[in-house]
């Protein structure tokens, strides 16, 4: 069977589902961040696949680049927040972080 | 089955299988290293789709930057003297059922829909065209991204080292 648009979409769907699964089930905040990165990657595969098989020129590639830049910024900010949470509460398990103020 | 298909199945299997280990492994360090293979497989898929520049950026930014940042986060938020860097899980059974339903419906929807594919020509190098687009019609977004990166850098640094 010739590899076409559907094959790439299936791969990105599987990545998306695994990212959601990581976000929903894992307790550790770092693993939730890894799930978010998986979801961003699956969105990027979709953008580039439609850019390849559709008549959109290179705009999909540009959007994918913007997503990568924003993912880098998001990872830096989120890790700073996680480090602060760890300094304050001595844990990064999301289900144990349930108070607004001491 | 030609070489293109073979490479696609290789990279797709690498991506999906290592992604599965990322979300199911109980050791955070192992998850981080499996994430390396996932990002590498995604870069290979970009190459197969003719996106050479995006693939290189994926390798530099994700594998070289974000993954290292995540591993730093793991190191800084766990007691390293504790050998078992493990993490628990919650909501396993409802999550598995719900994600299974979501995946099934998404796959059914995209396989049953007939996508209109127009261009199947061999891809060309994209770096020059992307650079031209970034300087011309996307110049504003390009500048804004630079400002966002600067703000994120300053914000992350000042937040991470704030004293109580």
Image (cartoon, rainbow, N blue to C red):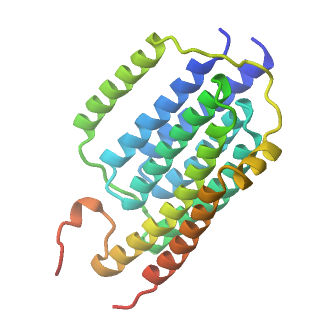
How far across and down, in percent of the image, does residue B90 sit?
Answer: 25, 48
Residue situated in front as seen by the camera: A97 or B113:
B113
> Is residue B118 placed above or below B161 in the rendered structure?
above
Q: Residue at x 42, y 62 (%)?
A: B84
Instruction: Pick the quarter of the image with the C terminus of chain B.
Output: bottom left
- The residue sitting at 68% across, 25% down in the picture is B8
Left or right of A61? Residue B153 is left
From the viewer's side, name the closer residue of B75 and A57.
A57
Looking at the rendering, which quadrant does residue B92 occupy?
Answer: top left
**Of B80 and A11, the residue lying toward us:** A11
Q: Could you tell me if residue B67 is visible in this image?
A: no
- Expressed as whole percent of the image width and height from the top left, the position of residue B160 reads 45, 80
Q: Position of residue A44 (x, y in %)?
A: 56, 40
From the top left corner, tell me how far across and down residue A35 is, in percent.
Answer: 44, 48
**Farthest residue in the front direction?**
B137
Q: Is residue A23 visible?
A: yes
Q: Residue drawn 53% across and 57% down? A: A70
Question: In the image, what residue occupies the spot 74% across and 32% down?
Answer: B50
Which residue ends up furthest to the bottom in the rendered image?
A: B163
Give the position of the N terminus of chain B as an image quadrant: top right
């Amino acid at each position: 069977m010739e590899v076409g648009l559907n094959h790439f979409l299936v791969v990105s769907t599987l990545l998306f589902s695994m990212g959601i699964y990581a976000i929903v089930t894992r307790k550790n905040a770092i693993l939730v961040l890894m799930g978010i990165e998986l979801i961003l990657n699956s969105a990027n595969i979709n953008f580039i696949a439609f850019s390849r098989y559709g008549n959109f020129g290179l705009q999909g590639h540009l959007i994918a680049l913007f997503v990568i830049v924003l993912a880098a910024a998001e990872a830096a900010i989120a890790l700073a927040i996680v480090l602060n949470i760890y300094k304050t509460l001595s844990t990064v398990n999301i289900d144990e972080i349930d108070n607004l103020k001491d | 089955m030609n070489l293109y298909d073979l490479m696609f199945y290789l990279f797709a299997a690498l991506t999906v299988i290592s992604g599965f280990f990322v979300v199911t492994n109980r050791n955070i360090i192992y998850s981080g290293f499996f994430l390396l293979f996932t990002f590498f497989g995604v870069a290979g898929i970009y190459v197969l789709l003719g996106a050479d520049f995006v693939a290189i950026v994926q390798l530099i930014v994700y594998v070289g930057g974000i993954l290292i940042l995540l591993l730093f986060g793991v190191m800084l938020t766990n007691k390293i003297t504790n050998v078992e860097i493990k993490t628990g899980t919650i909501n396993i059974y409802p999550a598995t059922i719900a994600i299974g339903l979501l995946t099934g419906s998404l796959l059914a929807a995209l396989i049953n829909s007939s996508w209109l594919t127009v261009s199947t020509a061999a891809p060309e190098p994209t770096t020059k065209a992307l650079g031209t687009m970034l300087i011309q019609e996307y110049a504003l977004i390009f500048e804004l991204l630079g400002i966002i990166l600067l703000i994120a850098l300053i914000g992350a640094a000042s937040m991470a080292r704030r004293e109580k």
